[in-house]
Amino acid sequence: MSTLKVSTISPLGTDATKTITIGESGGTLSIASGANTSGFGKIGQVLSAFKDDDFSTTSTSLVDITGLSVTITPSSTSSKILVYVCGGCSNGNAGYATLISLFRDSTEIGQSTDGSSSNNFVSSQSDSTANVNNFGSHFLDSPSTTSAVTYKLKLATQSGGTAVINRRGDGTARNMSASITVMEVLD
C-alpha cells in the first residue's frame, strides 16, 4: 500500500462542478481511529423511548414521567444531542394547564428564557371537556461530555387538577402515545 502526503487537495473545474471523488463505487472508505472527522455532521447513534400507557400527577412541581427517558453516552465532548419529543397530554380539571419540561440529568433545558412556570418546554391548556392535546418539540443540546447523560420529560399541573399523559384528563379513553428520541450529531 502507498501513502500520499499533501497539505491541500483542490478540485478542478468551475464553481458549479467542483467535486472530489475518493474511492470507487461500492468501495469502502476507512478513517483511522482517532482521526479528526470534523465537519461531517453525521449521526453517530439514535436512541428512543416509547410510552403507550398513561401517567398522571397532581403535583404542581415537575415529576419524572415514567418511561419517557433515554440515556446516551456521547462519543466526543464536541458532539451535540438532538432531542425530539411528542405525545398527548390533558388535565382533569378543565381550564388548567399541563406543564411538560425537558431535563438533561437534573438540569432543566429548553425552557423559556423568562423562567416562568407557565412557559415550560411544552405547556398545554386543557379545554372544557379535558380532551387530549398533542405536544411536540425539539431541542439541540451541547452536553460537553463523554459520560452517560439521561434526557427525560417531567410533568406538572400548573395550579390544579390532574396532569395526564396519553389519556383524557377526565379518566376516559386512552388514545395517545408519547416518545422521546435522542440523536448524537458528530462534530
Image (cartoon, rainbow, N blue to C red):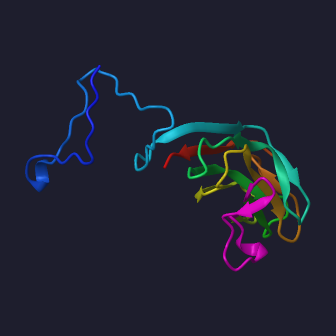
Residue 90 at x, y percent in the picture: 76, 57
Question: Is residue 163 shown to the viewer in this render?
Answer: yes
Image height check: is 91 above or below 42?
Answer: below
Image height check: is 169 above or below 34?
Answer: below
Reply yes or no: does residue 45 show up in magenta.
no
Q: Quadrant of residue 19?
A: top left
- Relative horizontal placement of residue 64, taking residue 52 as reference (left or right): right
* Residue under the point 50% across and 32% down: 33
> As drawn, which residue projects farthest toward the left?
13
* Residue under the point 72% across and 56% down: 131
* Residue under the point 72% across and 41% down: 71
- Relative horizontal placement of residue 97, taking residue 12 as reference (left or right): right
Q: Quadrant of the N terminus?
A: top left
- Relative horizontal placement of residue 18, taking residue 93 as reference (left or right): left
> As drawn, which residue projects farthest toward the bottom?
114
* Residue under the point 66% across and 43% down: 179
Depth check: give the residue in front, 108 or 25.
25
Residue 118 at x, y percent in the picture: 75, 74
Image height check: is 68 above or below 60?
Answer: above
Depth check: give the residue in front, 115 or 60.
115
Q: Quadrant of residue 126?
A: bottom right
Q: Which residues are magenta?
A: 102-122
- Relative horizontal placement of residue 131, taking residue 138 as reference (left or right): right
Total labels: the figure holds: 0
Question: Is residue 171 shown to the viewer in this render?
Answer: no
Residue 142 at x, y percent in the picture: 61, 57
